[in-house]
Amino acid sequence: MTASAPPKTENQYAIFLHIPKTAGTTLNEILKQQYGKKAMHWVTGAKQFESVGQMEGVRDGNIRLFNGHMCFGLHKFLPGESTYITFLRHPVDRAISLYYHIARNPNHPQYEIIRDRDISLKDYIESDMSTSDAKNFQTRILYGLSDEKPTNDREMLDIVKRNLSKYYAVVGLSERFADSVTLMRRSLGWSFPLWVDQNVSKNRPGKSQESPEVRSLVESVNELDMELYDYASQLLDDRIAELGDRFEQDYRTLQRVNQIYQPYGRLYSWARLMTLRHVLKRIP
C-alpha cells in the first residue's frame, strides 16, 4: 500500500535517524506508505555520507526521505533544507532487547561469544562487549557530527539536547508510539498512518521482569541516555500540549483507523512472510 508522498517545499528532505532496537522497523512500514519506495533512500551505517553527492535521486528531486542506521549529521551533505525524525527507547529496555537480539541471532558477531561462554545479561552489561552498543549509545549516535565539540560527556549531552530542539520535527518514544506517530503525521503532512507492530522480540523479559540489580546496573552505565530519554519525554509532552484539542482529535481518529486495520494488516504481513518462505524453499 503506497500513498502519494506528503507535500513539501522544494529541496526539503526528511531524515529518519533509525536507532537500532527502538521500533524503527514498524516506522519504516509507515514511511513506505507515506513516501513510496522510489522516494526513499536507504542509508547504511558508515556509508551514509559517501554517495549522497552522486545520487541521481537527489539531483532530480525524486528522493524525499533518507532513512537507516546512521548518526546525526546527514543534513550537512544534502542540497537543501531538511528535518529529522527519530525514536528513543528507555535505556534499560533497549539494552535488554539488544542482548536478547544478539543471543538469538547467529549472524551477529557477538552471538558465538555469548553462546559459548554462557554470558548472562548482567555479564554482558559489565563486559567491554556492551561498550559500543549498550552504554549511552543513543546519546552518542545523536551527537554524531555535531558542529559543537564537547570537552566531556555532560557537554555532549547538552549539545544533543539543543540539536533535538533545533533540527528534529519530532523525537518519538518507542513506549509512546501512537503519540509519536500522531505528531509526525501533523508535523510532516502525512495521511493517517497504518501499522502492525514489526520485529517484536519474543521469549524475552521486559525491563520490569529483570532483577532490580540488573536494572540498576543498566541505568548506572546509561546515565546520559537516561537523562536524554527524560528530556525527549518532556519535548513530546510539550508538543502535545501545544496542539491541545487538535492532537486529541488526531489521536482518537488514528486509534479508530488502526483498530479497523489490524486484522487486515496482520493478514497482509502473514501473506508476505508465506510468500518469502515459498521463494526461499525454491532456491537450490
Image (cartoon, rainbow, N blue to C red):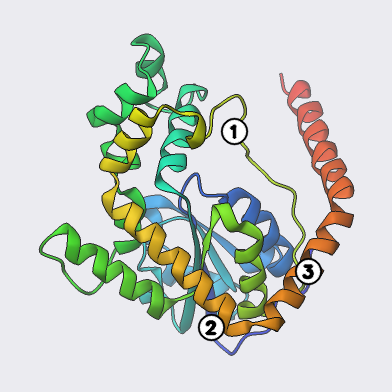
Residue name at image x 77 percent, y 66 percent: 254
SS for dot 2: strand
Left or right of 145 in this view: 83: right
Residue name at image x 45 percent, y 69 percent: 234
Residue name at image x 65 percent, y 51 percent: 26
- What is the C-alpha distance between the residues marked 3 and 2? 30 Å
Residue behind mark 2: 12
Question: Marks 3 and 1: which is nearer the front?
Answer: 3
Position in image of residue 279 (x %, y %): 78, 30
* Other-residue count near label 1 (Cα within 10 Å), few / some / many at <14 / 14–19 / ≥20: few
Under mark 3, the amino acid is Arg
Mark 1 vs 2, N-terminal side: 2
Taking the image as drawn, is residue 282 in sight? yes
Q: Quarter of the image for the C terminus: give it.
A: top right
Q: Quarter of the image for the N terminus: give it.
A: bottom right
Question: Marks 3 and 2: which is nearer the front?
Answer: 3
Mark 3 vs 1, N-terminal side: 1
* Other-residue count near label 2 (Cα within 10 Å), few / some / many at <14 / 14–19 / ≥20: some
Residue behind mark 1: 201
